[in-house]
Amino acid sequence: MERKSFIRQSLLAIPSLYLGNSWLLSSCNKKDEVKPGDWRGDVIVIGAGIAGLHTAKLLTNLGMNVTILEASDKTGGRIRALSGMADFDIQLGAEEVHGNKSEWYNLVTATPGVSLHTPDGEDYFFMNNTLKSETAWAGDATLVQAQTFESTARNYSGADKTVHQAELDQGNNPANFEISNALIGNEYGTSNNRLSIAGITEEDRLWDSGDKNYNLKTGSYNDVLQHHYAAVIDKVLLNSPVTAIDYNGTKVNVTTAGKVYTADRVVITVPLSVLKNELISFMPALPAAKKTAISAIGMGAGMKVIMKFNSRFWDGAMDSLIGGPKSAEMWVPGLGRSGAFVLTAFIMGEKAEHLSSLGTGAVSALLSELDMMYGGAAASSVFDTAHIIDWGKEPYILGAYSYPVVGGGIAQRAQLGSSVDKKLFFAGEATHTAGHSGTVHGALETAIRVVNEVTQN
């Protein structure tokens, strides 16, 4: 479930701080190709999300004997679609393609029946108990301050602090805090009072996949996985949650609920929260520096609520509705591709924790919010059905995606991604060290890195 949008106002040159730490960049070079070493052997890949699938495919292509263990009953990880609610598959996790300079963009556009576009819609903002289009709000001091803060927050210098503390220190109007939280914290998978402003600056300066964002025009990301990874998907051992990894000996033993698998090397691509919650035990224990890294990178609650209506009560040109006190942001997933009356609520951090606590009552809470914004029973009177995907409650995912916290940073991601004893290797979006964490293409890039590492003698 990657960030829906990135408003990249400027992509700055890498300053001397990064040039002095070139090892951070080389540990996940975005332009890497597969440049394997001479080592060959048996490898277990844990996790069948995009990082695991790509790793397994590349290793298989090199002639490796690869076993892929997936804890859940499906492949794809945080790439998942909902079929049947509309005349198109609604993305429950990853939704936008961020930039056209990535392997993910190349894979999507090379999939038969799948195409991308950038819908021509307008954002609507809810402020001061009023909902209006961005055009109608033009010149409003509250919105200007929120947008200015958003555009400069990723160009921060100074002592690390939360994004919310930074806006407090600047004396920003509390009336725009919901907007800035939606534009920044919610997009990074959390809340502004948990997100590091130095951390998002550090990552943004390394971002180079492009500024333009793309939505699906036709097809689904499931089609992309099936087209490019069919041979690997057929070999995934589903319902095989790993409970223990013993790397004491010359071989690595991986224990699932019903079987022990043995290999020379193991690639771990599970979501960060699986490691945070210690669902897998390691023998011997992971190095202290890696444990510190796991705790120094954020990942928390995140959910989408898909709501279908019998008629449209919002403006037909609306793309997103930003600033809801409960939802943070909603958008029209079928804009430019369907006439279905569907809204997706995208909720992260504290707001997600609250709605998650309501269970199915989250739908009623969001309908009440929409009624309040539009007046009367505008939404509830035409409501049809809903689907909740609560990623924090998905047992083998346990959250949205990683984000930087105060005191953390890219150095912690590099430590998380570092190998242990040439036996344990780590990939996945949280291990990306060059600005693409929290994205599908970032996860893909770590797969390339880890394959190069695994094949070294």
Image: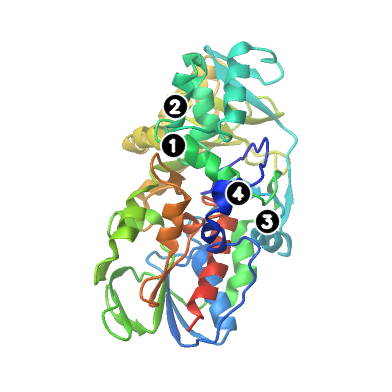
Q: CA distance from mark 2 to mark 1?
A: 8 Å
3D distance between C-alphas at marks 2 and 4: 23 Å
Label 1 Cα crowd, 10 Å radius (few <14 / some 14-19 / many 20+): many
For label 1, the SS is loop
Pointer 2 with pointer 1, Cβ within 8 A: yes
Q: Is residue 218 above or below residue 155?
A: below
Residue 243 shown left or right of residue 196 in the figure: left
Disc 3 vs disc 4: Cβ atoms closer than 8 Å?
A: no
Q: Secondary structure at mark 2?
A: helix
In front: label 3 or label 2: 2
Earlier in the chain: of badge 3 and badge 2, it is: 2
Residue highlighted by disc 4: 206
Query: Percent from the top left, x then y, of residue 322?
Result: 57, 27
Q: Which residue is mark 2?
A: 164
Q: Report the amino acid beneath label 1.
A: Leu
Closer mark to the observer between disc 1 and disc 4: 4
Callout 2: few (<14), some (14-19), or many (20+) C-alpha neighbours within 10 Å?
A: many
Q: Which mark is residue 195?
A: 1
Is residue 301 something one can see in this rendering? yes
The label on residue 429 is none
Q: Residue at x 47, y 41 (%)?
A: 189
Q: Position of residue 84 (x, y in %)?
A: 57, 51
Residue at 48% across / 77% down in the picture? 454
Mark 2 or mark 1: which comes first in sequence?
2
Callout 4: 10 Å neighbours few (<14), some, many (20+)? some
